[in-house]
Amino acid sequence: MDFNANFIRAILDISPVYIGARDLITDDWIFRSGVHGNVDELTGHTLDELDAHMDDEIEFLIHEDDRKKAYDVFEKVKEPNCDKPVELTCRVLKQDGSWMWTRVIHVVYERDEDKRGTKVAVIAEDVSDQVTIERDLKEVVKRLDEISYQNSHEVRAPVASILGLVDLVLMQQNLTRKEEMLFECLYKSVEKLDSIIKEINTLSS
């Protein structure tokens, strides 16, 4: 192995992503980074263990809810003139039994005479933290939507009713000046509350 090959291998070994090349005809790995000794560092499985499951790799490594997506991607990269990267985000089984969210990008770099993909470059990275953050953000957005709905319907409705009732009271002719002033202050306070509720709705929508 010459200097350039050694240098590239060293860069790949410290890269946060897993890089490999796969033969789509034989379904064998041509090359993969992140392997030290006999251990695949991305999943923690030994290469012997992975090789033993070569024929049922998807069933062994991919979460059952993500397998259809995985099969679809593997078929897509074999299609003639598949000239764009094909991406798959799925859960991959680690050696310790836990699941890791992984984003895998497939890029065809060799084809047969029918333009069907025969060899593909594979770039994979652990995106578990990113998926967790996205899931937490979706939960926060969902909660904000619920608050906005409650604000609009369960809080603002009685406030509007109070404004209407105070308005009716102020229309009465038999109020003393003191009573009129008190109801006017009440009306202004409730009106301010209504304005704040509207502003919260605007911010959360």
Image (spheres, helix red, strand yellow):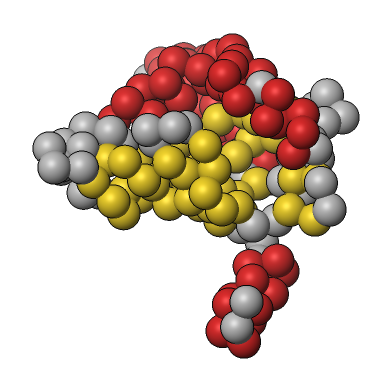
The N terminus sits in image quarter = bottom right
Pick whichever, 72 or 126, lies toward us. 72
Q: Position of residue 9 (x, y in %)?
A: 64, 71
Most distant residue in the front direction: 1
Residue occupying the point 70% across, 66% down: 13
From this view, report whether residue 34 is shown above or below residue 28: below
User: Outermost residue toward the bottom?
Assistant: 3
Name which residue lies at 77% across and 49% down.
41
Instruction: Please tell me how many numbered marks the rendered image carries.
Output: 0
Q: Is residue 127 left or right of residue 80?
A: right
Q: Position of residue 111 (x, y in %)?
A: 23, 46
User: Which quadrant of the figure contains the C terminus?
Assistant: top left
Q: Is 100 above or below relative to 32?
A: above
Looking at the image, can residue 164 be seen?
yes
2 vs 95, nearest the viewer: 2
Q: Quadrant of residue 17?
A: bottom right
Q: Percent position (x, y) of residue 199?
A: 46, 43
Report whether residue 148 is seen.
no
Q: Is residue 7 left or right of residue 95?
A: left
The residue at 82%/31% (across/down) is 95
Tell me where residue 155 appears, x and y as whole percent. Answer: 55, 20
Q: Spot the residue most to the right.
A: 96
Query: What residue is rendered at 64% in x and 57% in y?
Result: 33
179 or 14: which is nearer to us?
14
